[in-house]
Amino acid sequence: MGAGKISGIYLENGAMFDDVEVVACADLLVERAEEQARAYGVQKACGPDELLADPEVEIVLNLTVPAVHAGVSLAALEAGKHVYTEKPLAVGREDGRRMLKVAADRGLLIGCAPDTFLGGGLQTCRKVMDEGIIGEPVAATAVMMTHGPEDWHPNPDFFYQPGAGPMFDMGPYYLTALTTLLGPVRRVTGSARVTFPRRQVTSKPLSGTTITVNTPTHVAGVMDFEGGAVGTLVTSFDVWSEEHSR
């Protein structure tokens, strides 16, 4: 569900697994679903309602824009489908809790990206820490600072709307790594701002257009982990370049 830019890598990787069969591509713009279906050999392209009504569909991969993740995922769950969604699970906590409850009540599975904690790098770090090789972790720092996607993404407006911005877009990768290695967080403190209220697009095909920013574009936070470690996380779309370790 959702045949935008990110769908390509999912369709490409999905073809590598014998136990995964993509039976349909759906999008509000059916022609976009048709384009991806042709490119990746998917037999059916349709609108969202038709996909949810298809009895052959067991699980819905939600690749829509962040602002509608909750609505699309809830509709899929209510149609009796399992769900795997791109980040974020939802824009608001209450929507997220509702989705988890509906899934549990219906005996359905719901998962959310990123799955990067399963990669070799983080699993190696986890093994090193679990075996006490580096001693007790004291603190962690994660930094993601760039000048935003308006110079490379073909349709970057959604990055600057509620549910996106640097924290919702890239923060989950870092938070997933930190909580995998250090455990749950008991307290957070943060501050955020919008540095440039309007952004000019330089990527094609929308070069020269302007985006009105409706979500924070520089977010800084401190996390107190239950195990005692302190974490610092900064994400920004307002910095041209930086050399912090990541």
Image: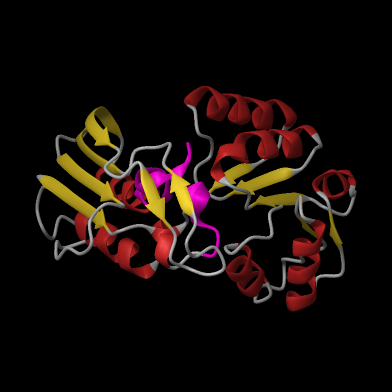
Horizontally, is 170 left or right of 85 in the view?
left
Please tell me in which quadrant of the rendered image residue 227 appears. top left
Query: Residue 163, position in %: x, y?
Result: 48, 39
Residue 169 or 205: which is nearer the viewer?
Answer: 205
Q: Report the front residue among 137 and 74.
A: 74
- State the predominant SS element of the stretch in magenta: helix
Q: In which quarter of the image is the C terminus?
A: bottom left
From the top left corner, tell me how far across and down residue 240 is, in percent: 23, 62
68 sits to left or right of 231: right
Q: Residue at 62% across / 25% down in the picture? A: 101
Identity of the residue furthest to the front in this view? 208
Residue 137 visible in the current orientation: no
How was the colour assigned to the protein in this rendering? secondary structure
Q: Give the range drawn in magenta.
A: 154-171
In the displayed structure, does residue 4 sit left or right of residue 228? right
- Residue 193 figure quarter: top left
Return the x and y of residue 167 as percentages of the image width and height: 35, 44
The quarter of the picture where residue 242 lies is bottom left
Count of marks placed on residues: 0
Along the line of sight, which residue is nearer the eye, 196 or 76?
Answer: 196
| Residue 164 among magenta residues | yes
Q: Is residue 232 magenta?
A: no
Q: Which residue appears at 72% of the width and 50% of the height?
A: 60
Q: Is residue 6 at all visible to an observer of this figure? A: yes
Tell me what residue is drawn at x 69 percent, y 75 percent: 15
